[in-house]
Every structure is written in C-alpha cells, then in structure tokens.
Image (cartoon, rainbow, N blue to C red):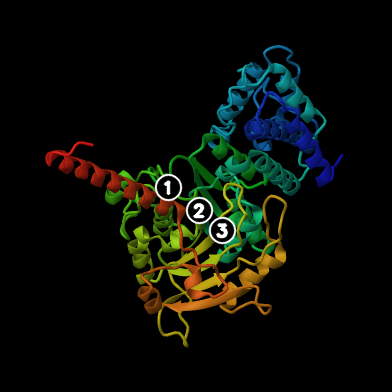
Amino acid sequence: MTVTLPELESRLWAAANSLRGPVEHADFKAYVFPVLFFKRISDTWDYEHRRALIDFGNDETLALHPDNYRFQVPDECHWRDIRRKHKNVGVHLQTALDLIQQANPTTLGGIFGDVAWGNTDRLPEHALNNLLKSFDEINLDPGSVSGDMLGAAYEYLLREFAEASGKKAGEFFTPPPIVQLVTHLLDPQPGESIYDPACGSAGILVEAVNEVRDAGGDTRTLRLYGQEVNLTTAAIARMNLYIHDIEDFDIKRGDTLRTPKFHDSRNQLARFDVVIANPPFSLKNWGGEAWQNDPWKRSSWGTPPKGNGDYAWIQHMVSSMHPKKGRVGVVMPHGALFRAAESEIRAGLINENLLEAVIGLPQNLFYSTSIPACIMIFRAVNSRIRENRKEEGILFIDGSQRYVRGRTRNTMDASDLKAIIDSYRSGEDALDGSVTTYWAPRAEIKKNGWDLNLGRYLKSAVVESVDVHSALKHFRQAQDSLREAESRFDARLKAAGYEQ
C-alpha cells in the first residue's frame, strides 16, 4: 500500500518524537536516521525477494542469490529479527547493524555511525523500543515509497532536526534556498565530477543531482565526492544519498583543511569540475600553523590568519577545481570580502582572474548566525570578459532585498532565486530594481585595496565596515599594548623614586 508524502512525513516525525524526554533534540538525528535506513534496507530486501521468487518460479535457492539484492542482509539481522527480541534490544540491534556493514563493506562500511545502541544510560531500552515500534507500521519498500518520496521525507526530517537544534544545525544543514541558489549558479552538467569539501548531510550533492535531472540530463553519469569531519554527519550524508537512490558517490570522513582525502594518481590534490560548499564561518582552530608549508600547495596565494579559516577553505576549493573547466561556489561571511589581513590572498586570486562574481544574500537566512552572507563564484576560465569590457574584473550582485520574512528566520522563494540567477547570467539589474549589479574592472578593485565590500560598488548594498572577529582581535591587542605601557610607566616612576 502506497502512502502520500505528507502521511510519510507525519509518521516519521512521530517516530522521532518517540525519543522526547531521554534524548536531546539535537541528538535525534543520530538515532532516527540509522533506524530509518535499517528499516528501508530490510523492507527493500523483502521486496526484492518477492520479485526474485516470481522471476525464478518460486525456486528459493535461485531467489536467494546475492545478485538479486541491492544490499546483503545476513541471517538474524533483518528488522523482524530485532523486533522479536525483548531483552538487551540495543545490543542485538548493534550486532545486526555491525554485521550488515561487514556484509556490505564497500557500500555500507561504517554507514550507521558510532551510536552505542546498547548503552541504556544514553538511550533507555523503553525509548529504543518506542522508536522501533514507531517504524513497524511504516512500509519503506520501493513499491510503497519511491526513492524520490523517501528522499523528500529524509530532507523534511533534516529540516525539522535543524529547527530543533538551533545554532548547532549549521554543522550539518544548509537552508534549501541557499543550496538551490549556489548549485544553480554553477550549473552542473551530466558526466561531471562534483565535490563538497564540507559536505555536512550531503544536501548540496543531492541538489546537484536534482539540477541535472530537472534539466533532462542523465544523472547516472555524475560522480559525487564529499568530505566531512564529523562521523555522525558523514554517516547521515551517505544514508541521505542512498535514500535518494544515488549510488555513485564517495564520502570520506576527515578534516579537509588538515588532511584532504581526495588525491590523484600523482598524490596531488584531486581536481573536480564543480566544487561547492557552505563551510563553517570563520573557523578558529583550522590548522593554520602548518599552512605556510602546506604539502598540497594550497597556500600559493598567501597564508590566512591563524584564527580565521575562511580563506583556507577558499584556497582549498580553488586548488581543487579543474584547471580548464572548473568552477567554485562558496558561501562566506561578508568579512571575507574586506578584512585587511586577507587582502594579499584576495589580490592573488583577483590578479589571476579567478574570482568571477560576488553575490550578497539577505540577512538571517542561516540557523547558526543571523548575519548576512555572500556567495563567491570562481572559475578556471572567467567568462565575464566581453568585447565591451577589455579589462578583467568582477561582477557584484546585491540580492539582499530578495527574501520572505519569517518568524525566526528569513527564507527565499522561487521568485527570489530566479531574480538573482537572472541577474548573474545577464550581468544586469532586475527589472523591478530588487537586484542590482555592478561590473568592477580590476583597476578599480586594486585602487580600493582589493576590498570587495559590496557597499563600495553598489549603492543599494550596506557598507560592511566592522568585522566582529577582527575588531575583537584589535581590541585585545590594544588592551595588551596598554598594559605594557602602564607597566613601563610604573617601572620608570619607581626608578625615579616615586611610589604608588
């Protein structure tokens, strides 16, 4: 029996809510997604078994051949096997998940994350039983729930978990309008490789597939890559892709800035057609102590401040794009456009004609911060040099007025996204003036000290004159200087015979 998407979403959210009380909202995802995926695997195995029996005339031996199944489910590791257990359910579930991973090492190794299912202090047995019971009545086989529908329901859960997690949501979830906008700007094509070095729950990679599919392209030719430092989030990313019936991907766990995991045959950084990410803003502990002598040669444009990793992400992404057809889309705080400490890096990227466009976004779109952000577009071959523009330069776009006001956060609808995308493609203002543009030649940017502050080039944009991170740093430096001066003054007074 098939279900509608609203029915499925309602049932899944009810399952998640069965954890209320013993489990923090921010931890729901660590428990719910593995159980959801386990149920999908078990129901799909049953569905494939029924079809195999039909195909082989009820010959059980032929029907059980491994080639008939997407994933192998070992004996006593099916959903129904776990539901027969009445004691130590978490221990039995842990064993089943471990054996499923071992039976599918290439595809499912480590996919269920690091939850200690047998730890009843973290997850009391009654709470686990309630969660499992909530899934009993949900048939998740492909005949009842398509990959597209389950994928949509998975994204619904991600949004709900993000709402419940507050600022922590920024670690794993980027609001869909931003994902759709930056992905559409880069226009992924069939046959291309797409890489997200801070992939979170893989929303950007899923959207890239959607872009190609919606344009009528063959999504089977796409090659998807991602790296994520958090083990639970990396597992959620892999489950997200499988739930969407996407199989040609490679998600690796690790610290991208310290230890990038994707290399080519010469043990250099791998190159990709599309590099796209919403990395953590202004990361303090990012590994700056080793960047100047980076073995992956990502520091050729300069060394970012040790207390701010924004341009480490940018340099990693630009270094990872294909040298002829590569393009990069990265979401950044506005401070990355004008901070003095990073002007040398901006100068290097601009002088190599790599930065194509800067797009200002509305404020209060993100879960983790209310500050406005921007999208920076880089291209290996900058297409903005036209016959009437003999000089290289950058397209500035102010899209900060295109949003729908929300109760706690703002959002952007389809018309907002279209207005910004149209201005990016045409290089012109929106007809109603809600999006404004300016093409700045390199000489003008150089004259401004490589400052990319949107307010310098667009009257409609607010001039961002204060970067909180830099301001605090300068304030503390001033405090230290004041203390040193007071200490020296006191020493001179004492030397002259004056006592305080």
Q: Check disc 2: other Cα within 10 Å, few if <14, some if 14-19, many if 20+.
A: many
Q: Check disc 3: other Cα within 10 Å, few if <14, some if 14-19, many if 20+.
A: some
Picture layout, residue 129 above or below residue 46: above
Read off the residue under disc 3: 372
**Label pair 1/2, CB-CB below 8 angstroms:** yes
Q: Which mark is residue 195?
A: 2
**Label pair 3/1, CB-CB below 8 angstroms:** no
**Label pair 3/2, CB-CB below 8 angstroms:** no
Dot 2 amino acid type: Tyr
Q: Check disc 1: other Cα within 10 Å, few if <14, some if 14-19, many if 20+.
A: many
Q: Position of residue 2 (x, y in %)?
A: 85, 42
At 36% from the left and 47% from the top, the residue drawn is 476
Residue 153 as seen in the image, left or right of residue 109: right
Picture layout, residue 276 above or below residue 107: below
At 58% from the left and 40% from the top, the residue drawn is 168
- Which numbered disc, 3 or 2, marks the residue that appears first in the sequence? 2
Q: Nearer the viewer, residue 385 or 462?
A: 462
Which numbered disc, 3 or 1, marks the residue closer to the eye?
3
Q: Which mark is residue 249?
A: none
